[in-house]
Every structure is written in C-alpha cells, then in structure tokens.
Amino acid sequence: MYKYFFLFSFVIISQNLVSQDIEGLNKYSLSVYTDLDGGSQKLSSKFIDKYVRGGYIDNETKDAFFSKLESKNRAGVVWDTKIELKKYSGNSDNKRRSYQLLGFENYYLYEAEFTNDLFGLYFYGNKRYENTKADLSDMRFKSLKFQVIKFGFYQQFQRLGFGLNGGLVLGQNYLTVETNKASIYTADHGQYLDLDINAKSTSSDFSQDKLFSAVGKGLSVDAKIDFWYQGNSKIGFELNRLGFIKWGENLKEQSVDTSYRFEGINISSIIDSFVIDLKSPEEFKDELVHSKLSEKRNRALPVQYAFNLHHSFKDEKLWLDAKLTMMPNTLYKTSFQCDLNYQFIRLLTLGVDAGVGGYSSWNTGINVGVRLAKFITVDLKARSLFNIYNLNKPAALIGSAKLVIGF
Amino acid sequence: MKNIFYLVFIIFVFGTSCKKDNPTWDVGILTPLVKTSFSLKNLVNDSIYKLDSAQLIHFVFNRNLYNLSLDSFFSISDTTISKSFSIDSLKLYNINIRYPLSLGEIAKQSGSIGALIIALNGNKLAIPALGPLSVPKVEFNADTLFTSMTLDDGKIDISFNNNLPVDITNVNFILRNANNNATIVQGSFPLIKSNSTESQTFSLAGQTVESKISIEVTNFSSPGSQGVPVLIDTSSSIIANLKVYDLRPSKATAIWPAQNIIEQHLDFNLRRLEVFLKYAKIKNGTIYLKLSSTIDDTLHFEYKLPGATKNGMGFEIIKKLLPGTISNPSVIYQEYDFSGYDLDLSGSNKDTFNATPNSIIVSIDATGIQKTFSKADNILVELGFKELKPSYAIGYLGSKTFAFGPSTVDLDFFKDVNGIINFEDISLGIEIENKIGANGELEISKFKANNIRNNSSAELVSPLLNQKILIDRATDMNGMLPINATQTKINFDKGNSNINNLASILPDNLEYALNLKFNPQGNISNYKDFLYDGRLLNVNLMLDVPMHFAAKGLSLMKTQNFDSDQIDFEKVIDGILYLNVENQFPISAIAEIKFIDDSGQSVLELYKIDGLIQAATVPPSGIVIDKKKSLISIPINQQDIQALKHARKVTIKAIFDTPSNQIPVKLYDNYSMDIILSASFNYKVD
C-alpha cells in the first residue's frame, strides 16, 4: 500500500509540461513552477525508502545494496522553485509573444560523492573493517541555498526569440566538505583506530540561515534563445544562474591534515564529526582542526546550460520534448530527458518520459497535463515514476509541477 | 554520515507522510576502551627509578630525615639597652671672684693710728695692734654666667692672701645672696700670717646661689708688727678669692658650656645565647634607636659599634635631637639595616664572647645664653638589635644534642603493590653530611617498617644500632667558602641486619629514631667551631630496592579514566571485552578489571578472568627482549553492559606469580606489560 501512497505523493510534486502552455494567451500570466532533479547512481529506491520511512534495515537489505556500490558513488538533488509574473505584448493570437518578467526563485542544491566504505562504516560498523583500512578519500559534499529576485524580458523577432533576466541573489547557506586522502583503520580486536585524514571545509554562518536573509549577496543572469523552425516546433538554448554570491565575513574555512590514533574513542563519533561539521569529538577539533576566516568570499552559482527541443506533430496533439542539461562544477552529470505527449482531449494530456544522466543513472516515468479552466493549467511530470515504483532500481527523483494562471 | 543521507534524501520525505519511525539497523563496533601499560618506570617517580650497570631496576628511595637549620642551633634574641640620663650629669662653668682690701682702706677704719699709718706711707713704722676691725660688705655680680642655681652639690673655696706687713687674726666673713641677704657660707680664719695665704673649702649642697652675691668681713684684727718697724705701703692688701666649682645643680639658669652629657663605653652583650660566639656575619637584622629629650637645647647623639664593620667602615649613628620640654619631649625613632655587617663578639678586650663594644655620647654645644635646666629634665636613650640572623658564625657551639625522631617517613612506592614478595639485596643507608665546623656523635636507636594496609611491621635488628658513630667536623677556607663537608654513612644490608625482612612486608612507612650530639669532647676547637647558614647538617635515608625478588600474588594495579559517554550503552545489544596483553615480564599473571562510577563505587567487577597472561620467555642472556602476546576474551551480558553506562574509571590489576620453584626473577629497565582493553559491541543504530 505504501508504494501507491509514495507514488501519489511523488506525482503531486512533479514537473512541467510545455505544450499545453497557456502563457501568452493573456495579457498577464502568473506561474508557479517547481523542478526537482535528484537521485543516485547506485542507491536503490528500496533502500532509500527503507531509510526514509523507518523500520529495521536488516543485513539482507544492506548486503543487497552494498554489493552494488562502487568505490565512488554519487547522490544529489536540486530543487528549484520559481514564481514569475509576466506581462505580454503583441497579438494575443500569436503564441510567440514578447514579455517582461518579474520573478522570484528559490534554489536548493545538495550533493555528495562518497565511497562505499563510508556506507559500510555507517551501516555495518567498523567491525567489518577489522585489520582493514576503510577508504574515505576523495569524498565531497556540498549544500547551497539561495533566492533570486529577478527582472527580465523576452523578445520575439520572427522565428527568433531571445530573453535575458538579471537578478539580485540572497544566499543563506553554503557548505562544502572535501576529503583528499582519508581512511580509518581498525586494528585487530579494536585495539586502536588510525584516522588518516586530509580534508577541508568551507561554511557560511548557519545561525543566519533563514529565508530571505542575506548571509551572502550576489548577482545572477539568465539568458535564452529560441528558434522556431516549424510552427510551434523550436530548438533553444538556455543559460541559467550565471553569477556569484559574495558570502559574509563569517565565511569560515576549516582544514585538517593529520594522522591520528584513537585509543578509546567511539567510531561513530569520528564519522559524524568528520563528515558533517568537524566539531566533535572536542579533542579532535581543538587539536587537529585549523580554522580561519576565508579571504576569498566570492563563490560561483551552479550555472546550468541546457539545449531544448520541442517538436509538434500534426494538429499539435502529439509532441516531443527533449532536453540536454549540463551543470559544470557540480556532481550532476550531463543529462538527457525526453518525453512524448499526446493530448487526448482538450482538458487532458498524457505522456511518457525517459532519461539518462543527472544524479541518477536512468529514469522513466509519465506526464499528466490538466487544463482546469480556460486560463488555468496544471502540468505534472513524474519522470522517475518507474524507478520509484520498482524499488530495486537506481534511485531517481526527477519531476516537476507547474501551475499557470492567465489573466 | 547519517546527516548526509538525511540531507540528500530529505526531499523524499517532503512528499511523504507515511513515515512510521526512525530507521534502525545493527552495526558491529570494534573500539578501544582503555590503553595502559605496566612498567616499573611508570609505576614510580623518576627520582626513585634507578638502573645499575646491568640495567637492573632499583627503586632507590631517598628521604631527607632532617635538615638542621641555624635556628635550631641558636638564635639571637632581640636585645635592648635603655637608659635615662638626668641633668645631674651636667656641668656648669666654675666661678672665680677676687676682691682686694688694701692697707690704706683698712687704715681709714682705724682712727688716729690709721691716720698715722697713712701719713707714714713709704716710711717705716712699728705698727701697733689693730682691731677689731670690719670691712663693709661688697657685692659681686655674676649674672653674665648664671641667674640662679639650686645645687645638689658644689664647692666653694674661700682664700685670703695676706700681703700686709703684719699678721691678721680672727678674720670672720659671710657670703650672702645680695637680694634676700640669705647666708650662703659663713666662716673665719684665726690667723693669716703676713705674706701668706689661708684657704677653706665649703660645701654648697642644698644652697641656692644667685648671681648677685655679697661678701662681708665682719671682723678681723692684727697684733701689729710687735714693735718692729716695717715699711708702710698703703697699697699692699689682703686679697679675698672665691672659687665656686663642681657644681651639680638640681635646677639652674645659666650659660652652659659645651659638654658631653652622656658618655659611655661598654660591651653590648647578646643575651640568652646557647652558643659562645666570637664572631658573626650578619645576614639580616636591624638596629633601632629611640631618643627622647626634655632638655631645652639641641642634643648631639653619637652611637658607635666599633666591632661592627661593613666594607671597612664601622657602624655608627649620628643624630641631632631638637630641644624639648617636659610636657613635649623631642623624640626620634629610627631603624637601621644591619645586614652584611661583620660583628666582632669577643668584647672590648678580645677575651670574652657574645659581646661587642659600643659607645654612646650625647653632647650639647655651649649655650651662649642662659638656659634653665632642671633635675626633672632627662634624656632617654633606647637602642636595640632586632631579628639578627647570622649567615656565618665562629665560636664554641656547645654540646647540644639533637633528636631526630621518633618519627616516620612515608614509602609511597609500595602502596600499589600487594602479595607476598621476598626481596633480595636490599640496603638501607643513613648518610650524614656535616657542613658544620664541629664534631658530632650519632646514635641510631631504632628502625621499624610498618605496613598499615595489613597491619604488619618488622623492626631492624643490627649490631650497628645504639653505637656511637663519630661524625667529623667540616672545614672551610679560613672563614671563606667552600666548605669541605664530611660524609658519614651507615649501611644496613643483609650481611649486618635483617633489612630484607623489612622491605618484604612492603612497608608504607619507616619509623626511626636517631640522636646527634655536637662537641661530645667539649670546646676542643678553642672557639673555632663554625657554621654557615643554610649549610649545616643533613641526615638522609636511602633505601635501595633492587628488582630481584620472588613473589606470589604480587599485584600491580592501575586506574584509568573511562569515558562511558563515548558509547551509548543503551544501544549496545551484546558484546565481548578483549584484553590484549603484550607481556615482557618473565612472570605470568591473571587479570582483574573493575569499573568504578563517579562516587567510587564498583559497578562491574570482572575477577580472576579466565585466561592467563603468559610470562615472557627468558633467553639465555637472562634479559627478555620479545614480549609475549596474550588475548583474553571476556563476554559480557546485557546486565554488564548496562552497568558500564555508569563507569567513569576502570581499574586493571595484574596479579603475578613467580614460577613455583620460587627462583627470584630480575626485572630490567625495558620490561613492560602493555594492556589494551577493547570491545566488540553489537550496536543498534536509530
């Protein structure tokens, strides 16, 4: 039963459709748009489901999952939510209308790259690593949270259209943790633990992490260009979040580079302190962690490049959407998402999705578009529905939801 | 780690409300709990731990039983001299009065005969008998010297010098104060021959003498020239002389001459000294002076200690004391640093001890004007030594006896050791280091070892006890450092005593009693004994315990902190404790582990754990190189685990037994037993 409930819950938060867009049909439109793109190469939906929903995780479950892990594993999620008010110009019969835009964007990014030994230590304990070195090298974790208040326009010239947004960025949370060389060795019968670690972290002032707080300030630019090659079919290119945040003076850099032998310390404490905040145990922090205020406080935003294709077939009842997305300087691999949609009746559109890349390895799902009234549409895309429903498949959580009100 | 997963997948939670509870799973944790090492080096202080040439461990226990201080030998009591001086020590100027009475003036009172005498001046005449005659009183004024003086004592000489050509007889005279006509002196001369002088001395004690004095010759006669013509010279005279001297006024208003009103040269004796010092170098101390005067004149105070010198200069105090009155005396109080002075204590004539010459002189200048001093006026001089501490002294130090004990000295290095242990080759030494320039005589009367943990004791038996042992005097470089101290050592070993028995009871303390007598043969140095402060006499005890023994049930114990907060024992399902031991001692052992809570109460006791900590193998060289490894597993149940929650300390005890043949083993410097207490816990994570 929980599967269906889980499925339903996921659909609720899923992603956009383009074809049924009522934008441009009115003088103004207000759209609320949320896009979630998360997953992991190797983490299975079943395991994550177990972890998130609680209950006892038995060794069989752990073994099944652990055996699939590679020496390096990725996991991450981007959650981007926008509210945009657009004012259109030109003939309302022309869907390719120019507009001016006032928008607000809320952006979260969490991503991690971790070794299978980290998972092993966490879920099996260090007993599994007796007389063995657990490798924790080259792991990284990043979290980022900010909002953008943006202004922009989109201009049509025959078959060509281009748009530009500029925005003020308010940053709330920034954390990076990276290990270069790190390992934990558990001696025979736990006589001692050797921690060998070279790691660094950069963090903003978490005590100020509130919505709209300006722990960091910056600028952001979005740009897009579209070319209509036939009717409503088009190809385009988007550049999103090209910009930076200058974090406040409390941006702190911490580093540790040491080999340390623990003789009487609980191993779980080591992991907690090492990965997240380097705070505990206190002895470890005070003696080994070097902390200073960061001299360079500018950090680039996670810029995104995307190539779009929207191709309509006859009567525009069937169309194909494809998107190639790149996010350099993140763990997000180049992704390709494709969906095919068909408008059965005026009020309902259904489609299927498939994709590769991103934080996951692959995903498939469905789309639903509903036109509730003349000027209200709700578009939902559950691109990873199949992954969620088949819990042994690689975890993927990709989807979007969009509500548009024209007036 | 958990937080990472939570962050990454929080989004999943976002759309689900079907979360039942926290995820849980089991992990296996291997963790060290306590690491400790038994080595004899760590068991005792570095100061105790010694090695011999073969690297055999010795516990050498040194204790200073007594440090003789200079104060315990003698101390110089604060000494003060205080003296009040009154005005009767003062002197006044002598007074001389001369009054001539010529023949002419006498003739004028003699009628016709007198006229004849005057007429025949320059001629010879047989002068007939004359008289009785008198001379009117004559006044003298001495107010340039004094106004009045009331005398406790004093003298006046009255003389008549008869320069007349005839004798005079029955000369009666009266000396009076002119103002009140009070008689000061009255007397007579029966005969004053021609050209001769007669004199009489009168006491002025109790008299008040004023500056205006009258003298009156009330009667005198002359038998004449007895018919023999004599040359008449009317200018020839009878001269009266008055000399006032040795005046000791009880009160006087006078011009006072410059004089020392106090002058004393005496030996200053240091009182209550138990030694007989000829010389001392003063390390620190103070001389203080208090002067008080009611005399209406400036006083000059001069104090000298010629026997006290510093940098070649004698000690002296020169002060000026301003005029005072009886109601408002003039006072000075001052202290002077006496540190660093060399003090000759052989007295003025170099024939005594504890005494140094000193002089006090108080003087006044000539007053020039009349001032009134009375007998009620006084000068108080108070002078003393305070807290004199010598750094060096020479003399005869006496035949004092010092008792060291009965007392006890703690031996704390056996406190963690239990069992039956038979030591070999123990030695107990008593060492006396004498830096005093005096002979001594030591007598050791008692040594007793006490184990207060098991209430056992053993007393030393040796022919060296109760023997008088001579301690030679130290020598110096004729009053200069360095000192050549003498060392006297009395050693108790298994050849002359039962000392091994004392050590084998693993004593917590040693009881002892010693007596030391100085100069048992008296003053044989003729006051040449010496001592330097801080360099006197030390009595040291040295107990040498070589680690060569046979033992049964010998236990070494160590207590370590145990931070149970590091492990959430509530989540531990079960577990095993591992005792990982690497033993280099050639003795096997069993282990006991006790976990203790904040209040010191035992929360988990693991007695006589199954499994032997194996003895290291002794190679032919006799010195163990390789450690023997032992692993002892100690399963613990849920009840034990819950008890561990409250543990804050853990005590690990190793109980050793030498092999059953009781052959003594030797322990060398590099020997140790390393113990790691680790645990394997099955742990529930949520």
Image (cartoon, rainbow, N blue to C red):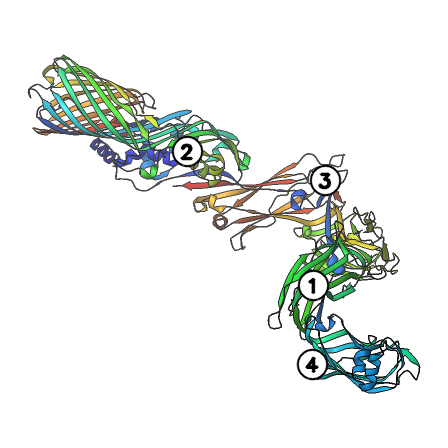
Mark 1, chain letter? B
**Label 3 to label 4, Cα distance in Å?**
115 Å
Mark nearer the viewer, 2 or 1: 1
Closer to the N terminus: mark 1 or mark 3?
1
Residue B578 percent coordinates (x, y): 56, 41
Residue A48 percent coordinates (x, y): 33, 33
**Label 4 to label 1, Cα distance in Å?**
31 Å
The residue under label 4 is: B178
Mark 2, chain letter? A
Mark number displayed over residue B365: 1
Mark number displayed over residue B469: none
Whether the residues at callouts 1 and 3 have beta carbons within 8 Å, the answer is: no
Q: Quadrant of residue B372?
A: bottom right
The residue under label 2 is: A275
Q: Nearer the viewer, residue B222 or A269?
A: B222
| Residues behind callouts 4 and 1 on a single chain | yes
The residue under label 3 is: B668
**How many neighbours does mark 4 have within 10 angstroms: few (below 14), some (14-19), or many (20 or more)?**
many
Res B252 visible: no
